[in-house]
Each structure stands twice: as C-alpha cells, then as structure tokens.
Image (cartoon, coloured by chain):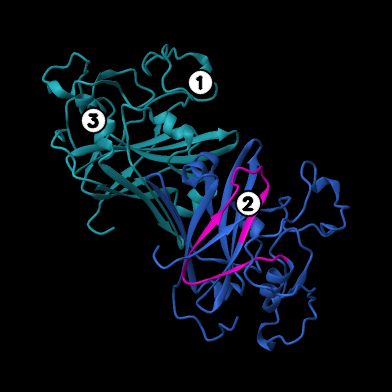
Chain colours: A cyan, B blue
C-alpha cells in the first residue's frame, strides 16, 4: 500500500432500519422521527472532523440546474438518515456540502475509522475519487443478531450500474499477523446500500476480528480501485 | 492458483458443543451420548469418499511406539467427535486411518466442499502436506445465532505452536466477481480448533456469501501455505 493517502474518520451515528428508506421519515433536525425506528438510539449527525475543504453549504434540489442531459438520473441520498432526492450528478456536492463527507484522492488510500467501540448502529463514510469517478465507502456497525454487533464495509460508485461494472474495489485489513481482503464490483448508489449490507454481500467482520485488526480502537482499511475493462467515455463525473 | 491439486470433500457430520471436549462423551458407535450434547442432531461419521490410499485401519494408543524423543507431546484428536488421545507424531496416522481423512500434497491446493446446503452442524476436513509438515483444514458450518448458520474455516498445523509460527496460510474464495482472502498464522492442533472457531478468529462466511462463492452447492477454497521464516530443522513430520 505504497503512496497512499490517509484519512482518519470518526463515526457518523445513525439509526438503522432494514428497509432502504422510510417514506415517513423525518430529517434529523425535525426530531419527530417515528418511534419504531428509534427504539434505542437517537439519530443525530456528528460532523466529520479534519475537513480540508471549505465549501459553503447550501441546499440542493432535484431541480438543480446545469446537469448533463445524458445523465439526468434521479436518485436518493445514499445515507439513510437523509431525505434528499436529486440527480446522480449532484450527489457528490450534496454529500460534501450537506453531510461534510470528505474526499480522498488516489487509486490507493487508507481509511482509518476511529471509535470502533461505540455501540451499534454507527456509520463511517468517506468518498474516494479516482479513475475519473467518485466512490463512497460505507463502514457500518450493526446488530443483525441482538447483542452481536458486526461490521459491514462496502463501496458504492456514485454513478450508474453500467459504470460500476467497469471497476473492482479491494478492501484490505492487515494487522496482528492476519490479513483479510475483499474484492468485488462496486454497486451503484442507484441501488440501496442498506440492502447490500443486509444481504451481507460485502466485507463482514465480527467483533473479535474487528478487534484483532484494530489499533487502539481504530480500524485501518486499505482501499484500492482498479478498472476491470476500458470504461466508456461517459466517465464525466 | 496454477498447478494446484484438487480434492472434493463431502461433509463429515458432527455435533458441535462450545466446549472443546466433553469428558464423558461417548464414541459414535456406542450411541449413548449424553443428551445435553445431542438435542437435535444424531452424531455419526460419514466416511469420506474418493479415498486414494488403502491404509489398513487400526486403533492407535498414546503408548504408540517409535516416537521421536524430542516430540513426545501428548494431545487429543483435533476432531471433536473422537475420544482418541495420543502423541503429536501419531495424529496424522490417526486421522488417516481412523477418520479416513485424505492428504493433499503441494504448496497450493483447492479444497472442494460439497453439499454446503446440509444443515448445521457439519464439518469438512482435509489434510494438507507441504513444506515438511501436515496441516489440517477445518471448514465448519455452525449456528452461532439460532437460524443463522455460518461457515468458519481455519487451518491447524499438526505440530507445536512454535512450529506453527513459521508458517502463513491463505484461504481464497473466488467466484461471481468477488474474491475473499484470509491470511493468518496457523494454530497448532495442541490448541483447540473449537475455540478458534468460537472466537471467530478465522475465515467467516455468512450463508449468502457462501452461496455467492458456491457452484451448485460446492464451495472451492484455494489453500496456500508459505514459510514466514526459516523453519528450524525440527521439521520431521
């Protein structure tokens, strides 16, 4: 993992529900979230620290101007806790400006998730820019079986499923004489990250493995993206 | 995975308990197994097919003659369902002759576990001979959370913990545009395979991942062993 960028990320706390999105869900600011979603956890966003860019936040709408005609694909924010809907092309500015998700550059990076001991549910999120596209890494701590939290990590392309098929991502953990690598084709953010994680079609760690790979409560995940075939010239994001 | 050996292995059915071994446990033939071990499953051995060697079975005892003086280490059979105790040096003939576990040769092999759909608990077991040692691969299907079977794969060295530290093993699954690799130091059979699996310090697959990596109910696991440092000249097995 030479020449890697390196980013420390604190968890973005969230409440998890098994469905992709609840139609009646409130925004965090409103505070009147339906109680069946929040039996044990309050939903709030904890802004990510170490923000290097200084973009001015503003609200984006799906009527956003200036979209490329060929890619006007409506979609929802890939973060569960957000009601935003817009076009695929403005997902990146939405994530940066509304959720303050930082972007790492380069084909190989290291994502350092801190405070792994915090109770489920929790999300750690980073954007990764390379090969002309933006990718979204989601690391989620979740209890699929009560009292047994697990960690799920997957990578989404902020692009269409056809574009996603051009790439392979690799997640790698390496510590304590153990190494775990997961390679797969990223999913498109037009699909639902929650269903990917619920299906377990991602890197899955039980708590003891997560501890073995962690250093002082932080988990370093090496991320690499490669192009599996010549991507079409539509890579414009 | 070029130049690999290839072996198809049917599951060895077993009953799992969380402790390493029950002192009062009966052999399968006796049929009077304590009921707290066998609430749902009958214990029986299904002989492994495709047996290439024709060793004559015989009972081994821990008074086995002809042991090397420096390695007379008493141990138990690594298979839960067996009461045998003996010395480390005769674990391999015990596994071959009493349990008909076959041996694959070569630094890289492929282990094909069939009938992955069978209900838990089940074990698939193979011995792997390379670099002057014998290794034991254990693939276990087990329900750690009721109704949610998982697969656990680990490799044990039929040798001492000091000898085990000389090696790294890699298990690799590769199918459906997904690849999962687990690398670790093998444990010694003097440790308890059940505790390794209970701790989850091994390759862990949920059912959906196992299905993604399976072909027609069979899971192919690529296995490679490497020496991590110059092993001492005590490699005599």
Residue A106: give x, y in percent of width and height.
20, 48
Q: Residue beneath label 1, please?
A: A38
Of the two numbered discs 3 and 1 on the same chain, state the one appearing first in sequence: 1
Residue A71: give x, y in percent of width and height.
18, 24
Contact between labelled residues 1 and 3, with CB atoms less than 8 Å apart: no
Please identify the quadrant where the C terminus of chain B is shown.
Answer: bottom right
Contact between labelled residues 2 and 3, with CB atoms less than 8 Å apart: no
How far apart in space, not on screen, are marks 3 and 1 (Cα)?
A: 26 Å
Chain ID for label 1? A
Are marks 3 and 1 in one subunit?
yes
Q: Residue beneath label 3, please?
A: A96
Residue B179 is inside the magenta segment? no
Question: Which region is colored magenta?
Answer: B99-125
**Up/down of A169 relative to A124, above or below:** below
Is residue B34 found left or right of A125 in the rendered image?
Answer: right
Residue A35 visible in image? yes
- The residue positioned 12% from the left and 23% from the top of the image is A68
Residue B123 is inside the magenta segment? yes
- The residue positioned 15% from the left and 23% from the top of the image is A70
**Residue found farthest to the left:** A66
**Up/down of B58 relative to B43, above or below:** below
Q: Nearer the viewer, mark 2 or mark 1?
A: 2
Is residue A45 or residue B138 the one in the foreground?
A: B138
- The residue positioned 70% from the left and 61% from the top of the image is B79
**Up/down of A168 relative to A62, above or below:** below
Disc 2 element: helix
Instruction: Give residue B198's mark.
Output: 2
Residue B211: give x, y in percent of width and height.
51, 42
Q: Nearer the viewer, mark 3 or mark 2?
A: 2
Residue A215 visible in image? no
């Amino acid at each position: 993992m030479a020449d890697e960028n390196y980013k420390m990320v604190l968890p973005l706390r969230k409440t998890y529900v098994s469905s992709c999105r609840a139609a009646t869900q409130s925004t965090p600011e409103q505070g009147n979230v339906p109680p069946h979603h929040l039996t044990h956890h309050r939903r709030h966003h904890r802004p990510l620290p170490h923000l290097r860019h200084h973009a001015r936040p503003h609200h984006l709408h799906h009527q956003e101007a200036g979209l490329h005609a060929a890619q006007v694909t409506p979609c929802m924010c890939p973060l569960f806790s957000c009601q935003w809907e817009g076009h695929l092309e403005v997902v990146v500015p939405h994530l940066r400006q509304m959720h303050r998700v930082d972007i790492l550059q380069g084909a190989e990076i290291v994502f350092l998730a801190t405070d792994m001991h915090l109770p489920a549910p929790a999300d750690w999120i980073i954007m990764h820019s390379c090969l002309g596209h933006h990718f979204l890494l989601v690391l989620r701590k979740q209890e699929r079986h009560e009292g047994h939290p697990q960690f799920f990590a997957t990578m989404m392309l902020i692009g269409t499923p056809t574009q996603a098929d051009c790439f392979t991502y690799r997640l790698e953990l390496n510590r304590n004489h153990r190494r775990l690598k997961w390679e797969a084709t990223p999913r498109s953010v037009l699909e639902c990250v929650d269903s990917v994680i619920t299906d377990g079609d991602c890197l899955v760690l039980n708590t003891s493995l997560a501890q073995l790979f962690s250093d002082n409560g932080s988990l370093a995940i090496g991320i690499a993206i490669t192009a599996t075939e010549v991507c079409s010239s539509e890579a414009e994001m």
